[in-house]
Image (cartoon, grey):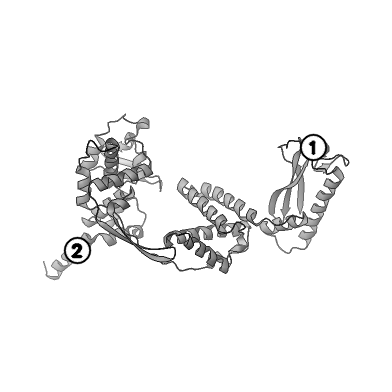
Amino acid sequence: MSVQFYLDSRCNRHGENPIRASFSCKGVKWVTSMGINVNAAIWERGRITEPEAVNGSGLNGREIQQTLDSLKEGVREWERTLRRAPTVLQLQQKVRELMGREADPSSRIRPALNTFIREQAAENQWAASTVAAFRSFGRHLERFDPGVTFESFDADGIGRWLLYLRNTGMEESTVRKEFQHLRWFVGWAARKGYTTQTAVCTFKPKFKIAEKPVVFLTRDELLRLWRFSIPSGEPGARELEDVRNCFCFCAFTSLRFSDMAAARWSDIENGILYITTQKTFERLPIDLCTNARAILRRYPRGTFADDRIFPPMSNRKMNECLRRLCRLCRIDAPVTKVCRKGGRRRVDVSPKYALMGTHAARRTFICFALSNGIPPQVVMKWTGHSDYKSMKPYIDIAADTRAAAMRRLERRWEGK
């Protein structure tokens, strides 16, 4: 066991530095503060040099050194009883026990979660939304149990966690996502040696999740939006015009909002828009149709900074304006959504405009292309989808495609 004591570089109001301790046991390392401050003038090579000196808390040098020596001997004696390397949590608990401190359960899981987010975000190049999702997950852990530890998540604890999430009024799909976050986090913590409690990694709860309706515009609805004349007296008419242009451009090209917002004039070569997607970092060639080129002519090059094609706008702001615009266009077909919320079945019927968002443009492109007989493999080249499974929801709703296929099959049966 390697135990080293050293002074933190920061000083308190008495001009004293905190003593920190570094422990290394069979390859497992942990650093903590001793909760004792001393003047740097009486400290040399990890030891107190003036036994009679008194710090701001009234402890003399002799008492402080005895505390350090006792801790060092205690952890070394404990190491001799170990047959294998301890976990970080076991090392923390033993040190706290020897220091006479009560275990601080809440401190065991939150620092680990912060380390997890920091490491995984760097390793997997997380988007800001993913980091925010795990920050939210951490807040739910604290509300579930302010003293939560890894040991809280045995089989019974996992059941209580799921019940807590459902009682907050979450949809079942969100409950499943939070459970997946817990499984990912605990699996990482086990590999790092923070815990040996891995019941969540083999726990298989049932989630009753109904398939969500895919909200998109039909051909007639898209053309109605495209040709709609926004009343000049409508508040924010210019902003609505920009939103309509941006949305329709995405619907005519299959772009996501993030890629449309980042598009630059320099990305266009010989009538083809080359986009390196924000989500997958894949470079895609997008053939610009007549309507897409008409939209580009509304924003001459140099209109916006950094050679950007479209006006700067947040996704949230565009969603708000898009719903207003679709309401003005009377895009109000009823859409039924069935889900479980708070553990209960719920049926909501909403006008389509209330469910519209920027991603509906991409869905509109995909559904229109499939319904007009374009093979999924070709559509995937445009959209950047990586596998057939990701296209299946769109294929399932392209009723016109199924009807056309049946008509072709009928003609084959009849020998035509």
Q: How many C-alpha atoms fall within 10 Å of the one at disc 1: few (<14), some, or many (≥20)?
A: many
Along the horizontal axis of the image, is 316 left or right of 118? left
Is residue 276 shown to the viewer in this render?
Answer: no
Residue name at image x 47 percent, y 45 percent: 128
Secondary element at image label 2:
helix
Q: Residue furthest right?
A: 52
Amino acid carrying label 2: it is: Ala
Picture coordinates of residue 415, whole percent (x, y): 11, 69
Residue highlighted by disc 1: 39
Residue name at image x 19 percent, y 63 percent: 403
Q: How many C-alpha atoms fall within 10 Å of the one at disc 2: few (<14), some, or many (≥20)?
A: few
Residue highlighted by disc 2: 403
Residue 145 in which image quadrant: bottom right
The CA span between labels 1 and 2 is 84 Å
Please give the count of numbered marks on the rendered protein.
2
Secondary element at image label 1:
loop
Amino acid carrying label 1: it is: Asn
Along the horizontal axis of the image, is 297 left or right of 257? left
